[in-house]
Image (tube, grey):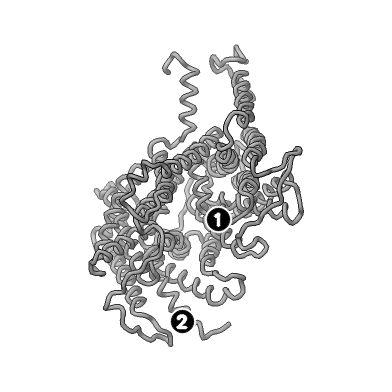
Amino acid sequence: MPASRFTQTGNYRVRYTQDQTIFATYAEQLSLLLLIAALFALPLILPRAWFPYLTQIVIFSVAVIGLNVTTGYTGLINIGQGAFMGVGAYATALAATRLNLPFYLAIPLGGVAGALIGTLVGLPSLRLKYLYLAIATLAFQIIFEWGVGHAPLLEQGGVIKPPTPQAFGVKDSFLNHNVFWYLVSLPVLISLALLWRNVLRTRHGRAMIAVRDNDRAAAAMGIHPGRAKLTAFLIGSFYAGVAGGLFMYFQKGAVIEDYSLGLSVKLLAMAIVGGLGSLPGSFLGPLFIVGLDRGVELLSQSALLGRVTAFAEGVDVASALRPFSFGMAIVLFLMFEPRGLANWWRLTRLYFKRWPFKF
Amino acid sequence: MNLDLLPQLLLAGVVIGSIYALAALGFVLIYKSSRVINFAHGQVIATGAFIAFALTQSGMNFWLAGLLAMLATFALGMLIERVFLRRMVGEPIISVIMVTIGLASVVDGLLHLTPYGAGNFSFTTPAALSGAGIDLLGTQLSRVQLAGVLAALALLGGFTYFFNRSTMGITMRAVADDQMAAMSVGTSVERVFALAWAFAGLTAAAAGVILGLMSGLTLTGLAGIGLKVFPVVILGGLDSVLGAIVGGILIGVLENLAAGYLDGLVPGGGTRDVFPFIVLLIVLLLRPYGLFGTKEIERV
């Protein structure tokens, strides 16, 4: 056992079970608990105007963890995570409108629907690899968008509005809508993140990483690569489905434009900017991209930019800056920091842990 | 089924299919030489088309404008390769894919900065193409369509000749076949990559201009061709020039047949937008390397 359970002074692990522990020290455990408490206390501190963005960050984090399960940890490139979110959103909307289920039952149902469809879409991964699988998920994304747009049951892609949710005597109203969904999404995110962290140290989680690193070698070790890949799709699309259900309520209805190819690309960008195959990255990526979006929005509203671009008439600067900055973020991160923000996070932590020694 | 429609649908399919083939050609060139899947191809197509349009707007002759646009995207392709893709050699596949997705977004943003980002534009049809069309198999084929098909076929033929006969074409094939071996006999792999991107840009502008002439210019419509390319190249085989041609025409015909015969069965219609992707999934499951692609053999 370590000499101290409070600060890490070295690696004292002598058994494999010790390598599987999530927290090395009590200090880490404590700081996580403090962080969670702080996140729950945010509605008391921050003005209400912040919560549309914070809620988005929380909901996208759920989807990005799911995307990391398939793409980051198992190495299956998935350009259809937005469609999986859409499946969850529509299943949740149907459960809420047709079956009159309350949101806390409808959203898990959305997750299950996402998982079912996701596993189905994952079936080609038994045969296809890399690029081909990426193209197959892209095809699913397009077929999904088209299918919803042509289904009378789903209002041809128009808005399906769920009944107003209610929890603990609090009703989701105009004034508290964003805070309400922030407080609903946050526990979902925390529990799903802890769930994945724990799955990761089971044989299934390790099998996925083995398949990512080399599926031939994994097969030689007695792992069934096909099963690991399908498990990854199952978990990843369950997360997407839950995120979709939350996002549907947050957007006050399911509408097809919310779950287009653009969303899939956005989620991939979040995963990459955060750092593929990293749990802290799954939070930092959405934080960065949503923040960037908001920053661009503020910039394009500011008077300064209006003066700079006054010469170009008929040009919508906001709709130009958004894809540009977003694309630049992806490209620059891939070129200069392929391990993403998670790497910065790791380096910062190491710096403090090892201070004043440089190495 | 109404068989009277058949010749018309087939003809329309071949017309649009030859443009798909031209668009797919650029995509295949890049994949064949550098194993990069280019998600920004649609945006390059749009850039080419809008450069040509801007030049004609300023009073330039249509043909000259088209030629200059092709040269501009030739340079753009080379630039993209040199600045962004050259650094990504040896990086994992997902990084390379995501760089092209990011680039698609960047070019999209840049196009939105021009006055052509939103709205619908159309070329003024040049005089040589505005006369009456010809009658083929009982259906009218306008001069624009005819010229489009001929130009596409000429470019495709030219590139096939280039690959089979010219030194540079053979060098490119050598690099596609085996980079290490090609390097060891003294070819410059970098130059081949740059040239592949440049040619992809050139054909993309050609496809964009022809499409713009036929059905108008919108950013989303032109960039959307970049997605239509996927069913084409998967059906034809990702690394086959012949496959791009055959696949393009097949997909064009299939989507027109779907529009003709399946639209009535589906509420709302519009099957032409989705049918190619269903074909894509079926091909991926049965024959992922396509009709003419190289079957990849994995060795441990």
Pointer 1 residue: A257
Q: Is residue A144 visible?
A: yes
- Above or below residue A284? Residue B82 is below
Which residue does the image show at 62% across and 70% down from the upper left?
Answer: B267
Which residue does the image show at 52% across and 69% down from the upper left?
Answer: B272
Distance from disc 2 to disc 1, alpha carbons, whole Å, reads 34 Å
**Where, by quadrant of the figure, is residue B136 drawn?**
bottom left
- Above or below residue A67? Residue A139 is below
Q: Amino acid at mark 1?
A: Glu
Which residue does the image show at 33% across and 63% down from the upper left?
Answer: B49
Q: Is residue B177 visible?
A: no
- Could you tell me which chain the residue with mark 2 belongs to? B
Q: Position of residue B170 (x, y in %)?
A: 28, 59
Would you call the spot at circle 2 few (<14 residues within 10 Å), some (14-19), or many (20 or more)? many
The answer to whether A88 appears left or right of A348 in the picture is: right
**Where, by quadrant of the figure, is residue A313 drawn?**
bottom left
Which of these two is toward me, A353 or A16?
A: A353
Query: Residue B8 shows which numbered tag?
Result: 2
Q: Position of residue A47 (x, y in %)?
A: 57, 33
Q: Nearer the viewer, mark 2 or mark 1?
A: 1
- Above or below residue A351? Residue A328 is below
Query: Residue B265 shows which numbered tag?
Result: none
The answer to whether B26 appears left or right of A207 in the picture is: left
